[in-house]
């Protein structure tokens, strides 16, 4: 599943990579004007293409999900166009994941690629954020559903079965192209002004960097990074569980209301 608007900076590489990993792709285009729509229309991976107008994240996800279900898939993966799996992930790896009878979801982490494409953001706050996986491959079930929230509609809901955290990483390429990223965050500022400080900080803050290394070139370094993020994830999960036990807080900075 892909929801996209003006993604030509990434689309050729994304389609080539996803063609090696997935059987087919359903797309919702939210008003592209840069050639994205035309490339999608002509690509053999794309089996369904809808076009929407006006920003509404939840609406577009629900539409993409309906189209995906019309294809009667067993497993579904939802990525943005600027999110590309690292080289070591192969279709055979996905097949092994999908052949696990008790697993319902696999989660993946995103890493912000910067500089000339050979580095990623590695400040403590960025690593803390990266520890929480934001993309999921799921075994589809009738109970699955997406929130229809205007923005930040979240991941798939209602999927049962064992959950696994994958160490196959995703390169978030949007942060590499500063003009693209600035335009994206400016749009978020307009549709979600309540989180203005977060968007400005995320767009403008300079953080320490580390070299991006593929697993084949530096297996010990990549394994060490993944284990460090696993430890951070454990801490974040524990803190989240404690906050849930203590009850919801009040005041500014609360999440946008989400509805089924």
Image (spheres, rainbow, N blue to C red):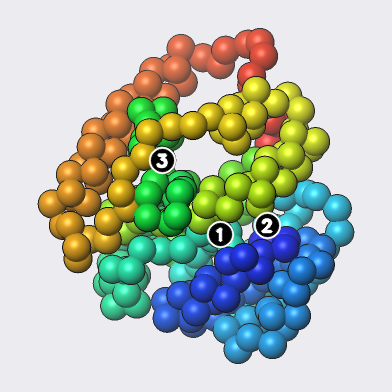
Residue picked out by circle 1: 82
Residue picked out by circle 2: 61
Which quadrant does the C terminus fall into? top right
Residue 91 at x, y = what percent?
Answer: 34, 77
Q: Eyeballing the image, is 206 above or below 167?
A: above
Residue 102 at x, y = what percent?
Answer: 30, 60
Q: Eyeballing the image, is 253 above or below 258?
A: above
Between marks 1 and 3 in the image, the one whose residue lies nearer the viewer = 3
CB atoms at circles 1 and 3 under 8 Å apart? no
Q: Residue at x 77, y 69 (%)?
A: 34
Q: Residue at x 68, y 36 (%)?
A: 258
Dot 1 alpha-carbon crowd within 10 angstroms: few under 14, some 14 to 19, many 20 or more? many
Which quadrant does the N terminus fall into? bottom right
Between marks 2 and 1 in the image, the one whose residue lies nearer the viewer = 1
Residue picked out by circle 3: 121
First reached walking from the N terminus: tag 2 or tag 1 = 2
Looking at the rendered structure, the secondary structure element under dot 1 is: loop
CB atoms at circles 2 and 1 under 8 Å apart? no
């Amino acid at each position: 599943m892909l929801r996209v608007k003006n993604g030509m900076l990434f689309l050729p590489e994304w389609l080539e990579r996803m063609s090696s990993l997935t059987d087919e792709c359903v797309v919702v285009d939210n008003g592209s004007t840069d050639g994205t729509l035309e490339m999608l229309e002509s690509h053999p991976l794309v089996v369904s293409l809808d076009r929407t107008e006006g920003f509404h994240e939840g609406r577009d996800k629900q539409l993409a999900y309906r189209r995906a279900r019309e294809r009667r898939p067993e497993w579904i993966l939802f990525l943005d166009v600027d999110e590309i799996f690292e080289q070591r992930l192969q279709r055979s790896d996905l097949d092994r994941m999908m052949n696990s009878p008790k697993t319902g979801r696999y989660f993946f982490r995103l890493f912000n690629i910067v500089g000339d494409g050979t580095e990623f953001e590695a400040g403590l706050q960025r690593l803390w954020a990266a520890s929480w996986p934001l993309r999921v491959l799921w075994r589809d079930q009738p109970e699955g559903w997406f929130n229809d929230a205007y923005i930040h509609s979240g991941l798939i809901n209602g999927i049962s079965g064992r959950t696994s955290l994958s160490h196959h990483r995703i390169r978030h390429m949007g942060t590499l192209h500063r003009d693209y990223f600035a335009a994206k965050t400016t749009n978020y500022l307009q549709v979600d002004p309540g989180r203005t400080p977060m968007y400005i900080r995320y767009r403008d803050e300079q953080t320490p960097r580390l070299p991006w290394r593929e697993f084949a070139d530096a297996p010990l370094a990549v394994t060490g990074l993944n284990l460090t993020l696993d430890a951070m994830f454990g801490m974040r999960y524990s803190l989240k569980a404690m906050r849930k036990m203590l009850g919801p807080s009040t005041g500014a900075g609360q999440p946008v209301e989400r509805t089924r």
